[in-house]
Image: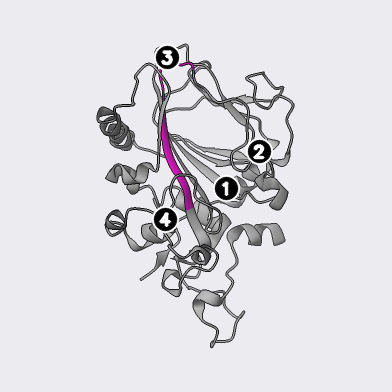
Amino acid sequence: MAVTAPPGFTPELWEIFERDGIIFLEDALAPEEITHYTEALDRITAVDSKFDPNETFGRENVVELDAALAELIDHPRHVGYAYDLFGEQLKLHISQFFIRPPGMTKRNLWHPDGARAVPYGVFSPRLPMQIKIGYWLTDLPETSMGNLVVLPGSHRHQYVDEYDTHELIPGELIVKVKAGTITIMNSSIWHRVEPNTSSTIRKNIFFAYCPAWITAADRILSDPTWLQSLTREQRIIMRSYEHGYSHAKPPASEFPLFLDRDTGTATDDGVYREDVQLHRRKRRTKAEEWIEA
């Protein structure tokens, strides 16, 4: 049986997200939760032969690597924000983590996430086609700690002259956060990474979501045995479909993903006749409501 959609954007947060392309939720994680997720990263790196403690290290499809990370697929701390955008066709696009030690030489240049030659913004100039949730497990109170750097408002821009460089851009924001902060980011925002000249090892987790019909970034199909270990909602959000068109038209068994958080219902009242099957009905997203208000 479907559960009610977790909380997501408030009107105030939606306004900031629309304007800046990123919002910050401080103290979203308790100290024991920070430890819980940090230990998951430590377990993974302890058995990975490619891990070099002196270089930037990352893994993808991390939900299949540790149960503590799998629980984040539909965690109520953040999945409601993605559901507000993508509704009944919510999909996990990528799950990943990064460890950025002092002295690292590998760091991201200015770029937006997603498609390159024809970016997401061409198809969806206002709403993101990918939203990235960041879990920050390390205190980053100063600059030059391997910080994320974003250009607020740049999710509206297809071109930035500083693309593929580390050059400073007027108006850029060096993200300085406390451990336990969650960021909600429009993946079309331009961003890069600072060097880490501190003594701190930056650790963080990213979960990105998209509509079901966009190709996943870190997998084709999920391990079927692992899928059986998930909850109904987690399994649906992974969208491990063998039939290609199922991504555009998920099977009836996948509906509803969540019940409406305000009404507790599975449909939009008064829109369709009762004989229209549930999985064939359009449901309005919260983003649509705010745009049309």
Q: Residue under label 2, please give it.
A: 20
Going by the numbered disc 4, the residue's amino acid type is: Met
Q: Amino acid at mark 2?
A: Asp
In depth, the one of 57 and 221 nearer the eye is 221
Label drawn at residue 37: none
In x, y percent, where is residue 290? Answer: 66, 58
In the image, the segment drawn in magenta is 92-105
Q: Residue at x 56, y 75 (%)?
A: 281
Report which residue position mark 4 lands on: 238
Looking at marks 3 and 4 on the same chain, the residue that comes earlier in the sequence is marked by: 3
Taking the magenta stretch, the answer to whether it contains residue 205 is no
Q: Which quarter of the rendering shows the N terminus?
A: bottom left
Q: Is residue 293 visible in this depiction of the protein?
A: no
Characterize the local packing of mark 4: few (<14), some (14-19) or many (20 or more) Cα atoms within 10 angstroms: many
Q: Are marks 3 and 1 in contact (CB under 8 Å)?
A: no
Q: Amino acid at mark 1?
A: Gln
Q: How far apart are labels 3 and 1 at the CA level? A: 30 Å
